[in-house]
Each structure stands twice: as structure tokens, then as C-alpha cells.
Image: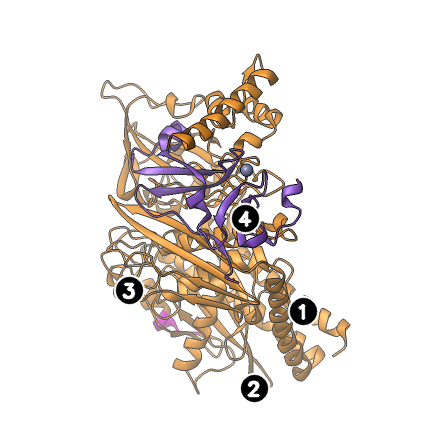
């Protein structure tokens, strides 16, 4: 095949995915899809293997491949042009029940030639708690509708009985209908464009290009791995829920052109819904691997071949049915994301050639807070606080992390406007801004996370309720790299208004200190937001890179002026003395010498 | 940086593998034991409750959550950090066995 044709076909495949994502967003009406970009679209080969991974949450790329394969096995002989299958069982392939896969075969001249697959986090799935994350679920049976594979559209016609059965089991059927229809539209566009591509170049040539594309990705990744140092690197993540702590432990070993991710030593599966299945763990390690090692390589089956995963059965990263998993995507899966980001970052940082590709962990701890209740128009609303997608960048070997800079597993994540949320829910924001001292200190600082507070506003029921799956608030999860510190951890505080009456606070100029009342940490379960109470949320910053004492004092001063680093932290962590808004060079040098001497003195004493 | 000129490889930016399969500080050349390690056994370590190390933003109300800082005993440069539950083993990074 001539290289020009190969390149054109490769690019067309990428654009097909791109256009399908746009379609998904145009049809969808939900904030989590449109604003948070909690979505994914990819193309698969006729056998279900990954052909062209798209953007969105990258831990879905391999899991959706398994979904395609599960549909191929279950419906052998009954797969027709125009069919669309639904699969959301975590023990078959999905990550959790609310991330529904729609899987559509693509035919040409009556022959199955490829698959399109996509997901969105549907507004509700009928779990014990509204919104899909179910901190109160003791098992998978309490986590809502779950299918290992069902035909939703038959040769282009909606199966009304199937659709109505699903809608009969969810809290917000009109929104879930829209979620499903947005995915059907997405599959339709992917199928049409793929068929047009094949019509133009012929099925043999397109198939040949696809096979070569997979081979190319495998060859490129293996070549890159051979350039990286051999060795093994460890990382560890803690998830605390209701006083119980679970560990995800990872040893990544790189030998020649192979990479093994071994989760031996991770804790047994939890009674809480933070567990993940093995397909989810596999997806979880690929989410950082695609962008960090394959930033210039097509994300497909070829990238998967050099990688091996060891995940002990019955552990938190390979739980057994009927363990609950509804919080997996922000629980064990995200910890796998973080752990893999750390070990890959360590390996890249140990390479003179690839050090600039290394990164400390980005936004490592989603806070899945789903608001629900009667809205200001008398209707019923369910929706996530999309600030969880705002994130924070990890520091690199040459630059600070990006403030509120997103996350590695989803390159297109973002948050909704305050006005969008206030228009949908009877709440008001007191403030939303960058959080001081949240970025992990280092020679290069991790990007800051954010902080916000909300109060009820014109709520017909006096307020709303929310489901919070805030595991891990006791531990910083955005690990630093090469001596950099972790980003500060998440914090969720219920501010109980004073009993003496008075109005709800209208401003938050001083952050949480603007809010009078008793403070209570909350993290797991269902809580009210009523009356004059407030909910304060702070999310983690990114990890830092290198020794904070090596940071340019002028950068520390600029951070203090911008309100991103406090003067106490500037002095204690960075050893920088600021007087009248300027760096006191002599005092800074003396302070840094003192801190270094105290490190060595402690060593001598021990 | 003459001490980094003849490294056989690296475990991290701050810890190299020097001649004879020894781990060394890449800033000052200080010996950190056999590269097969763990090099952290030969580094200085400071382990303090997270809130004490990082201040209010890091205070999660649990003294058992600690920040470990591993530094070079020769030049005091910070080589690595870990957050851990007190008593959990240190993470081990090592080059491939030769
Ligand atoms: Zn040194």
C-alpha cells in the first residue's frame, strides 16, 4: 500500500471518531456529557479489537473492545446491519452500570467489517442512590439495571419493548432516553462515515490499511520501550471509606520491549462500591499509558500487545461478583490511573531522552457529588457537580502543572459554567476559584485545584440532597515525582448554619472563612443541603516535581502574590522569605541552608 | 556535574547507577548502596504527619497519614517523596538486574 493512501485512511478513521463525538454532544442534553465530557467513542475491528481509540475517558477504550467481543460471542449468527447492542454489566466488560456501552456493527456489502462503540454516563440507572454512583449499595444487585448484552435496535428499528423496560427502571426517563438517542446518533454517524470510506477505497484496501495501522502501533511502541531503561518502579494509592483504608499497590516492570503491571499486594475487595473488575483495571492502566507513552502513536490493539497485567482475583482491582462497583470509575479505576501514571512517570523521568514526557500525577481524586431533588421550576433534577472534571495538572521536569488543568485519563474533560448549574438546580454559588496551597510543592509546582461553596436558593423544598462518593479524602492521591510533593487532598465540609437565625451568606470573599457555622467533614453517603447550610468542596492539586528548595524564589513570590501559595508554605516548604512583596535573597539563602542542614542533622542523629 | 558523566543508567532523575552497580546521588555522587537496592535504605528519611509537613491544606485529621521525604545524606537534595500510612513499607524502585 502506498504511504499516502495509508495516511489518508488513517486520518479519515481519526476524523470519523471526531465527528461521532460531535454528534454525541449535539444530541445529548446532559451536563455530564456536554460540559464534563464524560464520554468516549472508538472504532473496532470486525473481531472487536481496538482499531482507532477516540478521546474522552480513555479507560473505556479497552473495556469497550471487550464489550464488542462479548456481543460477538453472545449474538453469533444474529448480528445484522443496523443493529445496536447495549451492554453495561461490569462483570462482562463495563466499568460500572451507569456507563452504558452502545455497540454497533458496521457492515459493507452484507459483511461485518468493523464496530463502533461509545458510552455516556446516563443520568440515572436505577441504583439505590440517584445518579449511578451508589455509596449505599452493598452489592451489584443494588446498583441498578445491568445487562451483559441486549439488542436495543434491530436492523435500524428501535425495540420499544426493550427501551421501555429500561426507562421503567430509571428515575429520569426523559433524560436517559436522550442519553441513549445521543449514542445511537453517534453510532449512526460512525457507521455511515465508515461505509463511505470503504465505498471510496474498497473493502480490501481499507482492511489492509487497518491491519497495517495495528502493526505500526505495535512496532512503534515496542521501539519506544526498547529506548527506555529497564527496571521496576512502584506506586501505591490509598482509598479510605468510612474509616476503612484500602490500598492499590502497583509494581511496573519494564524489560526490553515489554511492560508488566503487577497489582500483587493490593488489598482484598472492599464491602464498599469502590472496587473494580479486571476489565476496568486493564482500562485503568491504559488511560495514562495512551497519552504518556503513545502521544504520537495511534491508540489501537497494537499498543495493547506489549502490555501485560497481573491483578489478583478477589482484590480491589479484580473483584468477584457480586461485589459492588458503582463508584469504581472514581475509586479503584482512578487509583489504577494514578498508580500507572506514577510508575510510567518514574520510568520516563529515568530516561535522558524521555524525561520531558514525564509528569507527576494530575487531578487524582474525583469527587462524585450528584445533586438531586425538586428544582426551582417544580421538576426533578439529577446531576453531577462537574467541577470534578476541572482537575489540576501535574508538574513536569521543565514546567509547573496547569492550574485547574484537567486530568490525564480524559484529555477533553472540563467543568460547566456556574450559571448552567444554577439554571438547573435551586442552588447558588458563593465562590469558585483556585485553592491556595493545593498544588504539590516542587522545583516545579503541581497545578492548583479549586474550591467552591454552594447554598440552596429558591428551592421549593427548602433545598436539595446530594450523593457523595468522596473516598480518599484522608490521603493525597496526586503523587509527586523526583522529590516533588503530592498535591493537597480533597476536602468536603458541610457548614451547619448558626442556630441564631439570620440570612444565608451571600458572598465568599474569604473562602470558607466567610461561612459562619459549625463545620462537619462529609465524604460518603447521602446528605441534605437545606436551609441556610452550605457545602464547601476543595479538590486536589497536581503533584510537584523535584526538590521545593530548588524552586526559583521569584516563582514562589509570584505564586504568593497570585494567592496560589501562602506565605507560611513559602517559608516552610520552599524556604523563601518574602519581605514587602519582594524576595529577601539573603534571608532565603539562609533559610534554605538551615532546612538542608536540618535534613542532614536528622540523618546524623539517627 | 562531573559525577553524572559516567552513569550506567538511572533509577530516577536524582538517583543514578554508577560504576560497579552502585546507586549514586546524581547531584553530588554520594554512594547510595547497591543499585539492586533499595537505595532508600541508604538515604536520609524524614517521616512526619502530613498536616505537620504541609500545613492546613494537607490536614485531613489523621496523624497516621505521613509524608516521607528521602534525601541525599551527602548534599541534602530531596530525592523522592511518598505519602503512606505509618508502618507501610517504603516503595522500591530499582534498575533491571544485570
Ligand atoms: Zn547528593
Could you say which disc has been placed on residue A110 in the image?
Answer: 2
Q: Quarter of the image holding residue A109?
A: bottom right
Secondary structure predominantly adopted by residues drawn in magenta: helix
> Residue A104 location in percent, x, y?
49, 73
Q: Earlier in the sequence, mark 1 or mark 3?
A: 1
Work out how far the residue at label 2 is from the one at label 1, CA to CA, in angstroms.
Answer: 23 Å
Mark 3 and mark 4 on one chain? no
| Colour given to chain A in the rendered image | orange
Ligand 1 - quadrant of the structure image: top right
Q: Which residue is mark 4?
A: B12
> Mark 4, residues whose alpha carbon is within 10 Å: few (<14), some, or many (≥20)?
many
* Relative to A253, residue A115 above or below: below
Q: In whole angstroms, how far apart are the C-alphas of marks 1 and 3?
A: 40 Å
Q: Residue B88 in the image: x percent, y percent?
A: 32, 46
In this rendered view, identify the residue nearer to me: A127 or B63. Answer: B63
Q: Residues within 10 Å of mark 2 (few under 14, many from 20)?
A: few
What residue is shown with label 3?
A314
Residue A211 visible in rendering: yes
Amino acid at each position: 500500500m502506498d504511504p499516502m493512501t495509508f495516511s489518508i485512511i488513517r486520518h479519515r478513521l481519526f476524523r470519523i471518531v471526531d465527528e461521532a463525538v460531535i454528534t454525541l454532544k449535539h444530541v445529548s442534553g446532559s451536563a455530564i456529557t456536554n460540559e464534563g465530557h464524560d464520554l468516549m467513542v472508538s472504532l473496532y475491528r470486525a473481531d472487536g479489537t481496538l482499531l482507532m481509540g477516540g478521546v474522552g475517558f480513555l479507560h473505556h477504550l479497552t473495556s469497550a473492545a471487550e464489550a464488542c467481543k462479548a456481543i460477538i460471542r453472545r449474538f453469533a449468527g444474529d448480528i445484522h446491519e443496523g443493529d445496536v447492542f447495549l451492554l453495561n454489566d461490569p462483570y462482562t466488560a463495563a466499568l460500572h452500570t451507569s456507563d452504558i456501552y452502545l455497540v454497533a456493527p458496521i457492515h459493507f456489502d452484507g459483511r461485518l467489517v468493523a464496530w463502533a462503540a461509545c458510552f455516556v454516563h446516563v443520568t440515572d440507572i436505577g441504583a439505590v442512590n440517584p445518579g449511578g454512583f451508589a455509596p449505599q449499595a452493598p452489592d451489584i444487585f443494588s446498583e441498578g439495571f445491568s445487562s451483559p448484552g441486549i439488542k436495543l435496535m434491530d436492523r435500524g428499528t428501535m425495540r420499544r419493548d426493550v427501551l421501555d423496560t429500561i426507562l421503567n427502571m430509571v428515575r429520569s426517563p426523559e433524560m436517559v432516553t436522550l442519553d441513549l438517542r445521543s449514542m445511537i446518533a453517534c453510532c449512526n454517524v460512525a457507521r455511515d462515515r465508515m461505509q463511505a470510506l470503504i465505498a471510496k477505497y474498497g473493502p480490501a484496501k481499507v482492511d489492509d490499511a487497518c491491519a497495517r495501522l495495528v502493526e505500526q502501533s505495535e512496532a512503534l511502541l515496542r521501539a519506544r520501550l526498547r529506548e527506555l531503561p529497564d527496571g521496576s518502579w512502584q506506586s501505591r494509592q490509598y482509598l479510605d471509606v468510612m474509616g476503612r483504608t484500602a490500598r492499590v499497590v502497583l509494581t511496573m516492570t519494564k524489560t526490553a520491549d515489554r511492560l508488566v503491571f503487577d497489582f500483587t499486594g493490593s488489598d482484598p475487595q472492599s464491602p464498599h462500591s469502590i472496587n473494580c473488575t479486571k476489565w476496568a483495571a486493564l482500562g485503568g492502566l491504559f488511560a495514562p499509558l495512551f497519552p504518556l507513552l503513545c502521544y504520537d502513536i495511534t491508540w489501537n490493539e497494537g499498543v495493547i500487545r506489549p502490555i501485560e497485567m497481573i491483578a489478583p482475583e478477589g482484590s480491589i482491582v479484580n473483584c468477584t461478583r457480586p461485589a459492588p462497583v458503582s463508584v469504581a470509575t472514581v475509586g479503584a479505576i482512578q487509583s489504577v490511573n494514578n498508580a500507572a501514571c506514577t510508575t510510567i512517570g518514574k520510568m520516563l523521568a529515568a530516561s535522558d531522552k524521555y524525561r520531558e514526557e514525564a509528569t507527576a500525577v494530575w487531578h487524582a481524586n474525583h469527587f462524585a457529588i450528584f445533586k438531586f431533588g425538586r428544582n426551582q421550576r417544580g421538576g426533578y433534577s439529577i446531576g453531577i457537580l462537574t467541577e470534578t472534571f476541572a482537575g489540576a495538572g501535574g508538574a513536569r521536569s521543565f514546567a509547573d502543572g496547569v492550574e485547574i488543568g484537567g486530568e490525564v485519563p480524559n484529555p477533553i474533560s472540563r467543568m460547566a459554567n456556574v450559571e448552567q448549574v444554577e439554571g438547573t438546580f435551586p442552588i447558588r454559588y458563593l465562590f469558585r476559584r483556585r485553592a491556595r496551597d493545593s498544588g504539590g510543592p516542587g522545583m516545579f509546582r503541581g497545578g492548583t485545584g479549586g474550591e467552591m461553596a454552594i447554598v440552596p436558593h429558591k428551592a421549593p423544598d427548602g433545598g436539595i440532597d446530594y450523593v457523595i462518593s468522596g473516598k480518599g479524602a484522608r490521603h493525597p492521591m496526586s503523587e509527586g515525582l523526583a522529590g516533588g510533593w503530592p498535591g493537597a487532598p480533597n476536602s468536603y465540609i458541610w457548614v451547619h448554619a448558626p442556630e441564631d437565625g439570620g440570612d444565608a451568606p451571600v458572598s465568599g470573599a474569604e473562602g470558607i472563612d466567610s461561612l459562619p457555622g459549625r463545620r462537619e467533614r462529609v465524604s460518603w453517603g447521602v446528605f441534605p443541603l437545606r436551609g441556610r447550610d452550605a457545602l464547601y468542596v476543595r479538590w486536589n492539586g497536581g503533584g510537584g516535581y523535584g526538590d521545593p528548595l530548588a524552586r526559583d524564589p521569584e516563582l514562589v513570590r509570584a505564586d504568593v502574590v497570585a494567592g496560589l501559595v501562602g506565605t507560611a508554605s513559602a517559608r516552610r516548604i520552599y524556604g523563601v522569605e518574602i519581605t514587602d512583596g519582594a524576595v529577601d535573597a539573603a534571608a532565603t539563602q539562609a533559610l534554605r541552608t538551615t532546612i538542608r542542614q536540618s535534613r542532614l542533622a536528622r540523618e546524623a542523629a539517627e | 556535574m562531573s559525577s553524572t558523566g559516567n552513569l550506567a543508567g538511572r533509577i530516577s532523575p536524582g538517583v543514578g547507577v554508577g560504576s560497579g552497580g552502585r546507586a549514586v546521588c546524581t547531584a553530588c555522587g554520594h554512594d547510595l548502596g547497591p543499585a539492586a537496592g533499595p537505595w532508600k535504605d541508604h538515604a536520609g528519611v524524614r517521616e512526619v504527619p502530613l498536616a505537620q509537613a504541609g500545613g492546613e491544606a494537607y490536614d485531613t485529621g489523621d496523624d497516621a497519614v505521613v509524608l516521607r521525604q528521602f534525601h541525599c545524606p551527602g548534599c541534602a537534595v530531596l530525592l523522592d517523596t511518598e505519602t503512606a500510612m505509618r508502618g507501610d513499607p517504603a516503595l522500591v524502585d530499582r534498575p533491571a538486574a544485570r
